Image (cartoon, rainbow, N blue to C red):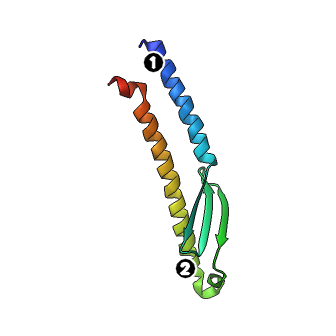
Amino acid sequence: MNMQQMIQAMQKTQRMYEKERKLIEEKEFTYTANNIVKLTMKGNLEIVSLEILDDDILNKDDKDMLIDMIKIAFDNVKNQINDAENELLEKYQNQSTLGKMF
């Protein structure tokens, strides 16, 4: 493989990666924390919806628990997004033309 072909292969891989990365940014990820809070976010961390599934949690005494459930839901959705991004990176690192050469 000459240098020009190698560069073209790398550019093609980059375009494919960017296309799939865009799909992750638009994909919706959801987590439900203890059947109390349901959070849906896109891969770009845009919140699509936040639902309170248990109306009893809305009283003043449970405010801290509600905050904790929102945090748990956010952290879990963010972890799902990070996992999807890492999986994509690994996929393209393994397919890299340079990786196959060395």
Vertical placement of 11 versus 22: above or below? above
Vertical placement of 22 versus 58: above or below? above
In percent of width and height, residue 69 lies at: 55, 73
In percent of width and height, residue 82 lies at: 49, 51
Mark 1 belongs to which amino acid? Met
- Disc assigned to residue 65: 2
Please state, as top left, top right, bottom left or bottom right, where the N terminus lies in the image. Answer: top left
Q: Nearer the viewer, mark 1 or mark 2?
A: 1
Task: Count neighbours of disc 1 (C-alpha within 10 A) and say few if under 14, some if 14 to 19, many if 20 or more.
Answer: few
- Disc assigned to residue 6: 1
What kind of element bears circle 2? helix
Vertical placement of 78 versus 3: above or below? below
Image-quadrant location for residue 66: bottom right
x 42%, y 35%: residue: 93
x 65%, y 82%: residue: 58
Task: Count neighbours of disc 2 (C-alpha within 10 A) and say few if under 14, some if 14 to 19, many if 20 or more.
Answer: few
x 43%, y 31%: residue: 95
Mark 2 belongs to which amino acid? Met
Count of marks, rendered view: 2
- Disc assigned to residue 45: none
In percent of width and height, residue 99 lies at: 37, 28
Task: Work out whether mark 1 precedes mark 2 in sequence or the reverse, and give the earlier one.
Answer: 1
What kind of element bears circle 1? helix
Q: Residue furthest left?
A: 102
Whole-angstrom CA distance, mark 1 to mark 2, is 55 Å
